[in-house]
Structure formats: C-alpha cells, structure tokens
Image (cartoon, rainbow, N blue to C red):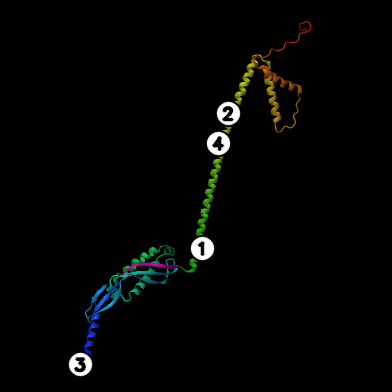
Amino acid sequence: MYGGFEVFGLLLIVLAAAVLWSTVKVVPQGYHYTVESFGRFTRTLHPGLHFLVPVVERVGHHVNVKEQVIEIPSQDVITRDNAMVRVDGVAFFQVLNAAKSAYEVDNLENAIVNLTMTNIRTVMGSMDLDELLSNRDKINAQLLNVVDHATESWGVKVTRIEIKDIAPPRDLIDAMARQMKAEREKRAQILESEGLRAAAILKAEGEKQAVVLEAEGRREAAFKDAEARERSAEAEAKATELVSTAIANGNVQAINYFVANNYVKALESLAKAPNQKVIMMPLEASSVIGSIAGLAQITGEAFGPKGPAPAPAAPAGRGGSVPSSKS
C-alpha cells in the first residue's frame, strides 16, 4: 500500500511539472503568439520568454510577422479595347497586428490572393492594350494603393505588388510584330528619304558654289584680258604717235615702215585663218621681198642716231637740166 502512494505521488509530481512546463512559452524572433483565456483573446506574446496562467490561458495562433511573399495565379483579363491577355503577379505583405490578422479574417493569405486578383481585373480592364503593356509601374501603384487600403483592417501592410507577366494571345502577338515591323520600315524609309534630300541639297550647294567660282574666274580673266588689251592699245597708240611724228617730220622711210608692218600683219592673219588652205596672192614676189628689205633698212637706218637719210636726187639729163616738152 505504501508503494502505491509513492507511485501516485510521483504521478502527481510529473503532472504538476507538465502543467508548469505548458505555462512557459518561448516566442522566437519574427513571430507573435496570441493568448486566449477560455477561448477569448486577451494578449499578444512578443519574442522572448513568457508564462501563462495554468489551465486558464493558452496560445491561440502563431503569427508570422516577417515580410512574406505570395504568388498571384495567372488569370485572363479583358482590356478596354476588348483584347484578352493572361496576367500573373506576386504580392509582398507583412503582418503588423497579430490579433487582427488572426481574428479579423480567416485564411489571410487566401484572402489577399483573391483580393489582389479581383483588383487586377478591375485596374487592367480599364486600360487599352498598348497602355497595359507600357505602364506596368502605373498598374503596380494602383494595385498597391487599393489592396493595401482594403487589408488595413486585417492588420496587414501590403508592401509591394508586381505584375510578373502579361501574355497576349498568339494572333495578337503576331499582329503586334507586323505592326512593329511596318513602323520600323516606315522610319527607315523616312530616314533614307531625309538622307537623300540632304545629299541632294549638298550636291546643289556644291554645284552652285562651283558655278559661282567659275563665274568669278571668268570675271577675273575678263578683267585681265581687258587690262592686257588696254595696255596693247596704249602701246599701239604710242607707236602710231611716234610714226605720225616721224611722218610729220618728213621721214619717208617711216611711212614705208608703217605700210610694210600692216602689210605683214595682214598676211599673218590670212595665213592663220582655219578655213583657208590655199591663198591666191596676185602679187609679185619681188615686191614682198622689197618690203621686207625696206623693213630691215627702216629698222637699221630710219630711227638711227643720225636721223633720217636724205632723199636721193633725181637723175640729171645730158645737158645738166631736165628736158622740157614742146607742144
């Protein structure tokens, strides 16, 4: 009988130890525990060592207060311009109030997923396809604002919502590819046309500059030719003046020089004419030779330092006088 009391006492000790141990709770970092007293929430246990009232209190929920990520399943969305696209995403959230997340909503993650999917259809359905594909940041911001405001009463803070993929139908992708190709070809043709126009403008400018330079060259050459002709005319006038002076002074050889010089120049012009092959000259060769000899004599004697030679005397008759004619 004594042995039975010892066993009973040992069992009581073990039971008391188990009860005491059940009242000791160690909450790990990143978690909050809710405490219920007879089924009613009383307080929240934060990370650390805590003691509960035996039999009266117990732990209700283990709530993860770290930032968590949940996948948003893909779904079909019809845009404002009646294009159907398939969309999926990801959401990040963090529990700020363990009691609200445990007692205000049932199955918190499922509630967030369904709320996000509903708002994705609402936000993206109000946009055109082009706007949908080019404004992901705008979509993410609108979704975050709406979902975070809706989950505030659950003690949850939605930190980010990101659209992962927007997949239009295959035929729509092909149409978009053709449109992009046509747009790029259009831009290429425009750039090519602009290049050709610029090249034509540059070519015209170059030709214009060449014509201007050529005209300026011709004008300069004309000025030079006119100046040369003017100087030649001055020289010829000077020579003519000298010859005229010599003639006025009674120099017959100057007259011969002037006539012979012009005669030779006329012959030179006739010889240089391109349409003349045979020149018929009804002249005696001796007269031409005499003219050339006269030129040599004029050059050596007429304008020498002794002045013009005196004219030869007329031959006298037999009697020393010129015979006169009788009627």
Q: Point out the tag, 1 or 3, that comes first from the N-terminus.
A: 3
Q: Point out the tag, 3 or 4, that comes first from the N-terminus.
A: 3
Q: Name the residue located 61 percent from the left edge and 23 percent from the top edge.
A: 235
Q: Magenta span covers which residues? A: 156-167
Main secondary structure along the magenta-highlighted residues: strand
**Quarter of the image with the N terminus in it:** bottom left
Q: Residues within 10 Å of mark 3 (few under 14, many from 20)?
A: few
Q: Residue furthest bottom?
A: 1
Percent coordinates x, y for residue 18 in the rendering: 25, 83
Percent coordinates x, y for residue 162 in the rendering: 38, 67
User: What residue sits right under mark 1 in the picture?
Assistant: 178
Q: Point out the tag, 4 or 2, that comes first from the N-terminus.
A: 4
Q: Point out the tag, 3 or 2, that comes first from the N-terminus.
A: 3
Percent coordinates x, y for residue 297 in the rendering: 70, 18
The image's mark for residue 216 is 4
Q: Quadrant of residue 26?
A: bottom left
Q: Is any atom of residue 38 visible in this view?
A: no
